[in-house]
Image (cartoon, rainbow, N blue to C red):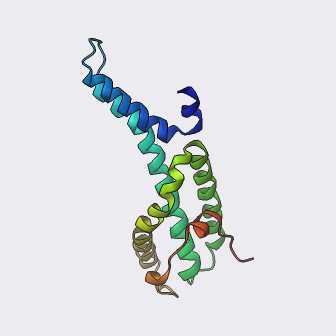
């Protein structure tokens, strides 16, 4: 079991929380708050998943800004943010490789939210997108490995 914890904390947290709930059902006479212990372990996995989703959304937002914003000044910052987010994604997937299969779905789910956020932020700066935000979509490869044009 210890090796699964080291190899994939997300999968480990799901398996352990299920095992604890099974143990609770066995009515073992131990002074353990089974359900809350299981919930806390499960929250480790949810945290990993939430971190991945957040970083994917950050990459999407900044890719969209790079392609649609007329602003020139913050472009390097957006690129730096993409680099940082990708490093965080890499760390999360290294620690929880079972989350890799969820990346495409997260990109699909987060794309509309990223569009909305970009639109809202552009309004704050009185900007009009130079491209239709609805037409911007990114593949898993683009989110995880896209390199800005020099």
Q: Looking at the picture, how far across and down is residue 129, in whole percent?
A: 49, 85
* Point 61% across, 58% down: residue: 86
* Vertical position of residue 61 compared to residue 149: above or below: above
Q: Number of labelled discs? A: 0
Residue 54 appears in the rendering: no
Task: Name the residue located 30 percent from the left edge and 12 percent from the top edge.
Answer: 30
Quarter of the picture containing the C terminus is: bottom right
Residue 116 vertical position relative to residue 127 in the rendered view, above or below? above
Work out whether residue 130 or residue 47 is closer to the camera in this orientation and state it.
Answer: 47
Q: Nearer the viewer, residue 48 or 26?
A: 26
Query: Does residue 148 appear in this view?
Result: yes
Residue drawn at the location 65% of the way across and 63% of the way down: 80
- Residue 25, horizontal then vertical, whole percent: 25, 25
* Residue 38 image point, x, y percent: 35, 30
Name the quadrant containing residue 41.
top left
How far across and down, in percent of the image, does residue 12 sit?
A: 48, 35
Query: Is residue 138 shown left or right of residue 39?
Result: right
User: Please, which residue is most extreme toward the right here?
Assistant: 150
**Position above or below: 33 against 76:** above
- The one of 12 and 37 positioned closer to us in this rendering: 12
- Say above or below: 99 vs 75: above
Q: Residue at x 49, y 63 (%)?
A: 104
Q: Is residue 76 left or right of residue 89?
A: right
- Horizontal side of residue 134 vs 58, given as left or right: left
Question: Which quarter of the picture shows residue 4?
Answer: top right
């Amino acid at each position: 079991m210890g090796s699964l914890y080291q190899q994939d904390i997300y999968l480990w947290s799901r398996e352990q929380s299920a095992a604890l709930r099974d143990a609770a059902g066995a009515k073992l006479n131990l002074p353990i708050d089974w359900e809350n212990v299981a919930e806390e372990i499960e929250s480790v996995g949810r945290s990993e998943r939430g971190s991945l989703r957040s970083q994917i959304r950050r990459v999407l937002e900044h890719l969209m800004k790079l392609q649609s914003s007329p602003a020139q000044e913050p472009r390097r910052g957006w690129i730096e943010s993409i680099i940082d987010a990708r490093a965080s994604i890499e760390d999360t997937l290294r620690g929880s490789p079972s989350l890799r299969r969820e990346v495409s779905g997260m990109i699909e789910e987060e794309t509309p939210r990223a569009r909305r956020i970009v639109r809202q932020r552009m309004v704050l700066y009185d900007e009009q997108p130079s491209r239709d935000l609805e037409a911007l979509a990114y593949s898993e490869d683009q989110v995880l490995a896209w390199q800005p044009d020099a």
